[in-house]
Image (cartoon, helix red, strand yellow):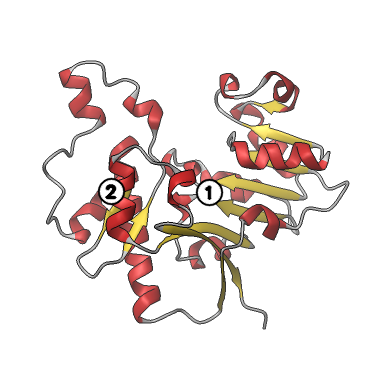
Amino acid sequence: MGVALSDGAAGAAATPLEALGRAVCCPSSVEAWPFPGKLRGKRALDLLDELGQSGVRRAVGLATLNALAESLWRTAPPAGVVIEAGRDAFDAAEIRPGERVVVVGAFPPFLRALKRMGQDFLILETDAAKLKPDELPRFRSPDQAEATVAEADVLLVTGTTLLNDTLDPLLAAARPGARIVMVGPSAGLWPFPYFRRGVSVLGGIRVTDAEAFLEMLAEGGSGYHLFGRSAEKVVLRPAAD
């Protein structure tokens, strides 16, 4: 999901595919994807109202918010933040052997990296069907969320928690001293609300060519097609005092 502003700044958000999966006939298609032919030229302020909705509508609001954050970075970069272009959030987590790791959301790049490391970890996920057979013993359901998160030395949280409105209770359940990494296009580039809630690493994307980015999305492109062409990974951290 992507939104470009008139000043050339653009933002992204994850597209909630489960919402689109219900779109099998005209009425449900309109409910799941209500914007065709209605977005171009709308004011960003109006699209921010979609943050109060769910599914694709909330994703559009998030992408708009993230585009506005990029616009602010261009015009008045915020103080107190270190931005590292081209760095992966998993590397920035600096996970050490023996640490207890909890991944919120079945994020395949993180799961593959943890398995390559031989690191023990748990996966907090709503749908066990998203996991591979060797990952199922690590599965924890939403009713185990608070206890599972409280065990973590490192908490890796995907931006989809912004779409399903589960982020705040997860962050509140984290134990003091846990390293919390928030990752994904939905997270955006305005880190202060996350930092105030204990997030120490924010891993998002920065759109470097809005026109090419939106064109690739329209053709069904994903991160594999975007990075190095029209977008780059970025990591944001609080600046050292």
Q: Is residue 54 visible?
A: no
Q: In terms of depth relative to the viewer, which is nearer, 28 or 135? A: 135
Residue 29 in view of the camera = yes
Write the residue at 34% across / 53% down.
213
Decide which of 97, 145 is in the foreground and name it. 97
- Residue behind mark 1: 168
In the figure, is residue 83 to the left or right of 176?
A: left
Q: Which mark is residue 215?
A: 2
Percent across and percent down for residue 148 are: 71, 36
Residue furthest right as drawn: 98
- Say whether marks 1 and 2 touch (CB < 8 Å): no
Question: CA separation, marks 1 and 2?
Answer: 34 Å
| Res. 6 image quadrant | bottom left
Tell me where residue 42 appears, x and y as whole percent: 14, 55
Q: Is residue 238 above or below residue 210?
A: below
Indicate the amino acid at tag 1. Asp
Which secondary structure lies at badge 2?
helix
Q: Nearer the viewer, mark 1 or mark 2?
A: 2
Residue 149, image x, y percentages: 69, 41
Q: How many marks?
A: 2
In the rendered structure, the answer to whether residue 66 lies left or right of residue 238 reads left
Going 45% across and 51% down the picture, which residue do you hit? 185
Write the residue at 45% across / 64% down.
189
The local secondary structure at tag 1 comes to helix
Above/below status of 211 relative to 16: below
Counting residues from the start of the chain, the first of labels 1 and 2 encountered is 1
x then y, percent, for residue 8: 26, 67
User: Which residue is located at x 14 percent, y 52 percent?
Assistant: 40
Up/down of 80 relative to 47, above or below? below
Question: Could you say which quadrant of the image residue 121 lies in?
Answer: top right
The three-letter code of the residue at mark 2 reads: Glu
Badge 2: residue crowd in 10 Å (few <14, some 14–19, many ≥20): few
